[in-house]
Amino acid sequence: MTVVGPFGLSVRDQALEADVQAGMTAVEEGLLEATKSEVPFITEAAQHLVRAGGKRFRPLLVMLAAQFGDPYAPGVVPSAVVVELTHLATLYHDDVMDDAAVRRGVSSANTRWGNSVAVLTGDFLFARASHILADLGPEAVRVQAEAFERLVTGQILETAGPQDGRDPVDHYLDVLGGKTGSLVAVSCRFGAMMSGADDTVVDVLTQYGERLGVAFQLADDVLDIASDSHESGKTPGTDLREGIPTLPVLRLRERAARLGLAEDIALCELLDSDLSDNARHAEALRLLRAHPALEQARRDTVRYAQEARSALAPLPECESKTALVELCDAVVHRAG
């Protein structure tokens, strides 16, 4: 049993382990190559988050999905580089929108160089991803374009908030399907597609990725409240401070509206106050960590992870399928 990838995923088959490790090494090399520029400053900024590390969750999914076809097919590694570059680009932009100070345990690009450089660096990464995509064929370009449209739509919907009469939790889960589920789904889709897997397998893995992506983000929501910066790689309560309504907060507000308990209402009022004040922010984190809403968010995470696991049922039993199932368990474990 060897540990590879994010969350300490265990791979029990030596051949699969060798394939995954070789693929992930090639992806790292591809990321560094794709973020080089003739302008040294651009290289420094573009490689800032690459060199900071990260889980490489999406490339790992590409490698595992490719096992259902030819994992050595020439498009597999480049497609994994594309999804990770796209993900990294969104992180540069997200940190500007959230005014985040820390990302992956290092100063965020916007903190180090300012918002303009961070936004433009994200754009640079999108451009490099598109350049690689052009060599993967028109179908790959179409798939990525559709996912990117969903990703941006999810971000816009999050910013705009739910329409009158729309359940905020349902709205939020739709947002996550776009913001996170779409790119995780494409990771699985690219791996299967580039390896030449059957269309049925491609569809199954795409559905799995969509659900796993939402579970992954819900686990992040829980971590934003429950973890310290050492565990999550960013400042705890970043979303809370910025007033971004993650699932634990939405579950709190839902409970406050339904039960009308004084302590729930008081906590909602605290969350609506100025959380740039460190004392208020710390108190809000303390109260949310002990609140039933956090446990409800954990249960929601488990539900989506179980749906991802169920989606894999049509696939033949093999080591790669076992690893994909274990990723569902790892996401749940991550949420506590």
Image (cartoon, rainbow, N blue to C red):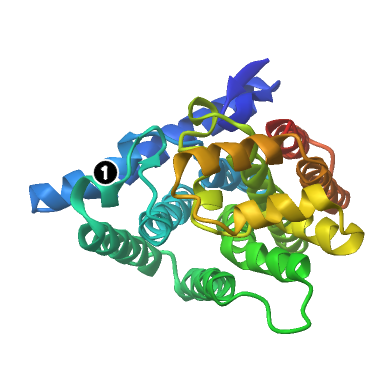
Outermost residue toward the bottom?
164
Image spot of residue 102 (x, y percent): 38, 40
Q: Is residue 231 left or right of residue 329?
A: left
Q: Is residue 7 left or right of residue 169?
A: left
Foreground: 150 or 311? 150
- Residue drawn where x is 69% and y is 83% of the image: 163
Do we see residue 197 in this rendering? no
Identified by mark 1, the residue type is Gln
- Residue drawn where x is 55% and y is 42% of the image: 57
Outermost residue toward the right?
259
> Is 140 drawn above or below residue 26 in the view shown?
below
> Is 68 drawn above or below residue 119 in the view shown?
above
Picture quadrant where residue 220 is located: top right
Image spot of residue 196 (x, y percent): 62, 57
Looking at the rendered image, the quarter that the C terminus falls into is: top right
Foreground: 90 or 125? 90
Outermost residue toward the left?
39
> Is 183 drawn above or below residue 145 in the view shown?
above
User: Which residue in the structure is indicated by mark 1?
Assistant: 47
- Residue drawn where x is 61% and y is 54% of the image: 271
- Residue drawn where x is 72% and y is 39% of the image: 324
Foreground: 67 or 254? 254
10 Å neighbourhood of mark 1: few (<14), some, or many (≥20)?
Answer: many
Image spot of residue 12 (x, y percent): 71, 21
Image spot of residue 246 (x, y percent): 64, 55
